[in-house]
Amino acid sequence: MSNFEDFRREHRELDELFGRFLAATGAHDTEAAALAIEAFDDRLRRHTAREEETVFSPIEGEKLLQKEPEGDAARHSRELRLEHVQIRELSGMIRRLLSERADLDGAGRLAGNLARRWDAHTEREEREVFGSGA
């Protein structure tokens, strides 16, 4: 199995974990939602770190906001890394809302944003980086 197949499989696993969070939120089960987003967030952080180490082009000086001209590969990697940062931030915010405040309503308000970003990112990554094969 190629690394890209591994990453696709991990995307589906993360989809499942996030689905558990959404189901728990819909059922107004704060404890289950907190456990689900914790599992999602932990797995997300391991997954994105592995992608950044093995798939993306290195970024000189690790600058996510580039002002100087750059090649297509460097720009593409920088954009995907920035998407990772945004997704991790949202996931972490939801996790903190639930673990520190048991704020299910606040977590639910952020869930749609995270879902849209995660779906768009994985679709882009699988199409542009991994290729169209399953």
Image (cartoon, rainbow, N blue to C red):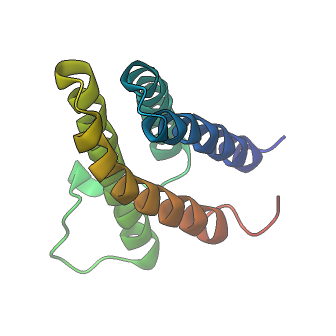
Image side of residue 48 versus residue 130, left or right = left
Q: Position of residue 43 (x, y in %)?
A: 50, 29
Q: Position of residue 28 (x, y in %)?
A: 41, 33
Q: Is residue 99 visible?
A: yes
Image side of residue 68 versus residue 75, left or right = left
Q: Is residue 85 visible?
A: no
| Image point (31%, 58%), residue name | 82
Vertical relation: 12 (above or below) 49: below
Quadrant of the image occupied by residue 65: bottom left
Image side of residue 99 versus residue 52, left or right = left
Vertical relation: 124 (above or below) 41: below
Q: Position of residue 47 (x, y in %)?
A: 52, 36
Foreground: 84 or 96?
96
| Image point (43%, 78%), residue name | 72
Q: Position of residue 10 (x, y in %)?
A: 65, 39
Vertical relation: 107 (above or below) 64: above
| Image point (66%, 45%), residue name | 7
Of the 4 image quadrants, the one containing the C terminus is: bottom right
Quadrant of the image occupied by residue 95: top left
Of the 4 image quadrants, the one containing the N terminus is: top right
